[in-house]
Amino acid sequence: MPPMAFTGTVTKVGFMNKTATVTVSRWIIHKITGKRIERSTKILSHDEKNGQYILHDCHTLIQRLAELRLNDVVSIRNCPPISARKRFRLEKVLHSPEGERELAHRAQTMMASSSS
C-alpha cells in the first residue's frame, strides 16, 4: 500500500486508550446539480501518548494529561494494522485552538501582572 497522509480534525479523544478519532473532510462535485458537497470520513488513529496512566499511590491511578485535544488539526499517516479498525498513526499536531487560547490567556495575565 502506498503511503497515505491526511489532515483532519480530532472529534473524539480520551474514550479509548491510545486512540483518537480523526474526521477527514473533502469536497466533491455532485454529478447532476454541479454543487459542491462536503464529505467526511471518521478514521481511528493510534496516539502513543494518549491514555497512559501513572501510579499516584498504591491504590489510585491518575491519567496523564494528553497533548491531543478536541478540535485539534492533526496529520495522520497510514501504518501496518494496529487493531481491527486502526490503520493510521498520529504524526503531529498542526494546530491546536485550545492550546493557543491558553497561551493567549497566560500572556494576557503576564501583561496585567507586570503593569500592576
Image (cartoon, rainbow, N blue to C red):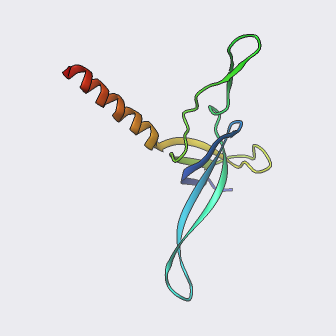
Q: Residue at x 68, y 14 (%)?
A: 56
43 up-or-down from 35: above or below: above
67 up-or-down from 2: above or below: above
Q: Position of residue 16 (x, y in %)?
A: 72, 40
Task: Find residue 103 and report its image quarter.
Answer: top left
**Number of marks drawn:** 0
Q: Position of residue 23 (x, y in %)?
A: 59, 55
Q: Position of residue 78 (x, y in %)?
A: 65, 50
Task: Find residue 15 and report its image quarter.
Answer: top right
Q: Residue at x 62, y 31 (%)?
A: 49
Q: Nearer the viewer, residue 114 or 29?
A: 114
Left or right: where does residue 17 sit relative to residue 40? right
Residue found at the far right of this picture: 84
Q: Nearer the viewer, residue 34 or 3?
A: 34
Q: Position of residue 90 (x, y in %)?
A: 60, 42
Q: Nearer the viewer, residue 66 or 24?
A: 66
Left or right: where does residue 43 sit relative to residue 102? right
Q: Residue at x 20, y 20 (%)?
A: 116
Left or right: where does residue 33 sit relative to residue 1? left
